[in-house]
Image (cartoon, rainbow, N blue to C red):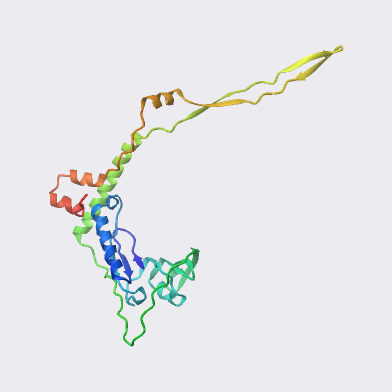
Amino acid sequence: MVVIHKGPFGVNHGVELHKEVVEYAEERLDEFIKNSDSFDRFEFCKPHFVVGNCLEISSDSNQYDRVYCGAGVQKDHENYMKILLKVGGILVMPIDDQLTQITRTSQSSWESKNILAVSFAPLVQQNRTDSSKPEAVVLPPLTVRSLQDLSRIHIRRTLRNLTNDESGGRNSTQRMSQKRKRRRCRRRRRINTYVFVGNQLIPQPMDSEEDECIEEESKEEEQEKDIEPIKPEEPQVNHLRDKILSLPLPESLKAYLLYYRKK
């Protein structure tokens, strides 16, 4: 199960029953932060994973804006899952083979709708074989970010917006105009002929011909086609990284702004 506060200044918590799955998730997260260019193209809220049964979350846990459960929830646990939501929050979980979206509209009311039919393995139930009370799952506390961390987020956001504006301007000047075709039509009139029958002039209409329309490219486009060869698609550039590396800053500060990324 994953519980989320949206945005780069929020929190992202994941609860997983199996320790080895959490270890694998942390390895993949570390690899993503160090190597993926997507980390620089979008603002990112780093998730924190906890090993435990999501049905044993501590009762004093925080409430969340978004909650997703990736296993089938029994009907008697529906209210337990709803309590994790803030007012206005949305919970998505499988119930009775239906992926269900639940929105908390007030402290005591929810709206529910089915999204689609699904088949999920059920949540693992709490172990009640002995008299001992199961250990509660404690989610990470909500802490205030340091001023240094907040500064890094704002600097990266400003530089990202700047590079997006610059790259957008470059792309607009290099973008080729779409090919335009003009329609040329030749319209033919109906011609009547006349014959004399006795002393009378009788019209004899000819079969009319349909209009003929031809689509042709403009001369300018034909010339462009002859002059400009097709260029291979260039690999995407990490503009944010290039911008940070070009700044007149100490190398240690550049590394901090890049989250000490390898690429």
Coordinates of residue 252 in the picture (x, y in percent):
13, 52
Coordinates of residue 195 in the picture (x, y in percent):
80, 14
Count of residue discs: 0
Q: Is residue 196 above or below residue 86?
A: above
In the rendered structure, the answer to whether residue 110 lies left or right of residue 214 reads: left
Coordinates of residue 136 in the picture (x, y in percent):
31, 78
- Residue at 28% x, 68% y: name it: 20
Among the 4 quarters of the image, the one containing residue 9 = bottom left
Q: Which image quarter holds the N terminus?
A: bottom left
- Residue at 25% x, 46% y: name it: 240
In the picture as drawn, the residue positioned furthest to the bottom comes out as 131
Taking depth in this image into account, of 33 and 46 the one nearest to the observer is: 33
Q: Is residue 22 above or below residue 42?
A: below
In the rendered structure, the answer to whether residue 133 lies left or right of residue 109 reads: left
Taking depth in this image into account, of 45 and 75 the one nearest to the observer is: 75
Among the 4 quarters of the image, the one containing residue 210 = top right
- Residue at 21% x, 58% y: name it: 149
Coordinates of residue 124 in the picture (x, y in percent):
38, 75
Taking depth in this image into account, of 24 and 213 the one nearest to the observer is: 24
Among the 4 quarters of the image, the one containing residue 3 = bottom left
Q: Is residue 257 above or below residue 141?
A: above
In the picture as drawn, the residue positioned furthest to the front comes out as 20
In the picture as drawn, the residue positioned furthest to the top comes out as 199
Taking depth in this image into account, of 49 and 105 the one nearest to the observer is: 49
- Residue at 62% x, 25% y: name it: 211
